[in-house]
Image (cartoon, rainbow, N blue to C red):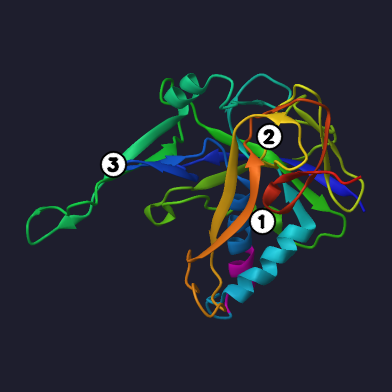
Amino acid sequence: MSWQAYLVVLRLRSPLHIGHSKVGNLQRTRPYVTGRVLWGAQTMRLTRDAYQGRGPAADSRQYNKFGKQVHSLLAVTYFYPALKSNTHEGYSVQWPWENEGAFRRRFLSSYAGTALSYPAQSATEGTLHEVEFISPRTLDTGEPVFLTGYVFEKKGCTLSWQEAFRRLQLGGERGYGWGDVELVSVQVATDKHLFGDSATSDREGDRLSIHIPKGGRLLAHAVAEGLSVAGDVEPLVGREWQSNNPSNRYAGQHVRFNEVCFSPGSIACENLNLVVDRFGVWRASSE
């Protein structure tokens, strides 16, 4: 079994919030798009396209069907902010860990809001909140911000994922128009190196393999068990919609714990052989 790699470039057209953690009233964003977010957006788009004209896709089992196909037929890297450049690819990835302070000042902003109490003509007590986002333009020079990453298609894949990428909406606050992206390009990637020389991919086999040299950076969350890596560790937890559950059956009520992982940007202490698992998470290879 083999995989075909595609380099995908998206232009960010509105603020993008990828939920991370909460500090006081501030809901922080991750400075990149996770595999879970991409999986959810693709699953939503593919499901709704398939049921268009046949009534609303209102049962989580419909989404579960396409979600499993996305897991089995596609693999993704995380997507990172990028700016236009004179490089061979035409875009320069902006790694958030290279200079965190400068990255935050250039790409991250926030929006403050509150609920209103109309009878009192004032703000409702306890509802002040602030949502951090990746800006669609750099905050210093006003350059357009792009998102770039890789999609790997398993041989025999029949999913219309490229068409789905033309109408994706990513992350949180989508009801306010956030997370709107425009597909700029999808190019076949023949080079086995990912994002320049950061990692290499082995595209033969039932599972996609990733190789990180000693001193290289992890470019996705990686399950901590069995890895010799220096960096931050965090549990990966996500909310899901499982309408067929007897309890916690409404959107966001079902909490799924994945794994304890090293965060992107962590440094490999030895050569690592990894495989891409569900939601784009990397895991130590058993081979």
Q: Which secondary structure, mark 1?
A: helix
Residue 223 in the magenta stretch? The answer is no
Q: Amino acid at mark 1?
A: Glu
Residue 19: which disc?
none
Location of the C terminus by quadrant is: top right
Instruction: Select label 1 or label 3 by which is in front.
Output: 3
Q: Earlier in the sequence, mark 3 or mark 2?
A: 3
Residue 219: which disc?
2
Q: Amino acid at mark 3?
A: Ala
Residues rendered magenta in the picture: 46-53
Q: Position of residue 32 (x, y in %)?
A: 56, 38
Residue 163: which disc?
1
Q: Is residue 206 left or right of residue 236?
A: right
Q: Amino acid at mark 2?
A: Leu
Q: Is residue 20 left or right of residue 167?
A: left
* Residue that mark 3 sits on: 112
